[in-house]
Image (cartoon, helix red, strand yellow):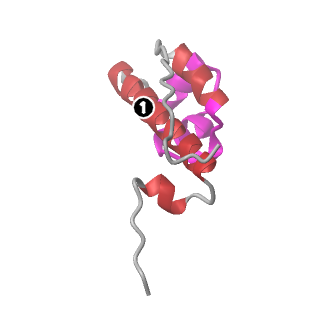
Amino acid sequence: MTRQRFSSVWDAISDTPQEAENMKARAVLMRAINDRLDEFDWSQSTAGANLGLTQPRVSDLRRGKLGKFSLDALMDIAKKVGLTVELKITVDEKCGA
């Protein structure tokens, strides 16, 4: 059995490089949102009321349930907690296109 090396856990668990990049972006965004929620010290019900989410949805966010949130949904939540997202695009030299 040979061992594979991956750049990140997302690369290891994703079926495609595209899925891995999406998961990486969602994870970074979710972490930043949770950091802001920690700063606000809101209860889950208060966070839900302020963000237009149900308490169970806030619970999923706080527990890092990445698969339950699209990148679009996380972008919307980020804006509501005062975060601005900057996108950095680089060329992947390994891409054969």
Is 45 a magenta residue?
Answer: yes
Most extreme residue toward the bottom, as rendered? Answer: 1
Q: Is residue 35 left or right of residue 56?
A: left
Q: Is residue 47 left or right of residue 96?
A: left
Is 12 a magenta residue?
Answer: no
Instruction: Determine if residue 52 is in view.
Output: yes
Classify mark 1: helix, strand or loop: helix
Decide: is 37 above or below 28.
above
Q: Amino acid at mark 1?
A: Asn
| Residue located 44% across and 87% down the image | 1
| Residue located 61% across and 37% down the image | 57
Decide: is 67 above or below 36.
below
Where in the figure is residue 4, as x and y percent of width and height?
42, 71
| Residue located 39% across and 54% down the image | 7
Residue numbers of the magenta segment: 43-71
Give 78 or 86, whichever is nearer the viewer: 86
User: Image quadrant of residue 33?
Assistant: top left
Give 33 or 58, whichever is nearer the viewer: 33
Q: Residues within 10 Å of mark 1 (few under 14, many from 20)?
A: some
Most extreme residue toward the left, as rendered? Answer: 39
Instruction: Determine if residue 54 is in view.
Output: no
Where in the figure is residue 55, as x and y percent of width and height?
59, 34
Q: Is residue 61 left or right of residue 68?
A: left
Label 1, on which residue? 34
Where in the figure is residue 72, as x and y percent of width and height?
66, 28
Q: Is residue 15 left or right of residue 28?
A: right
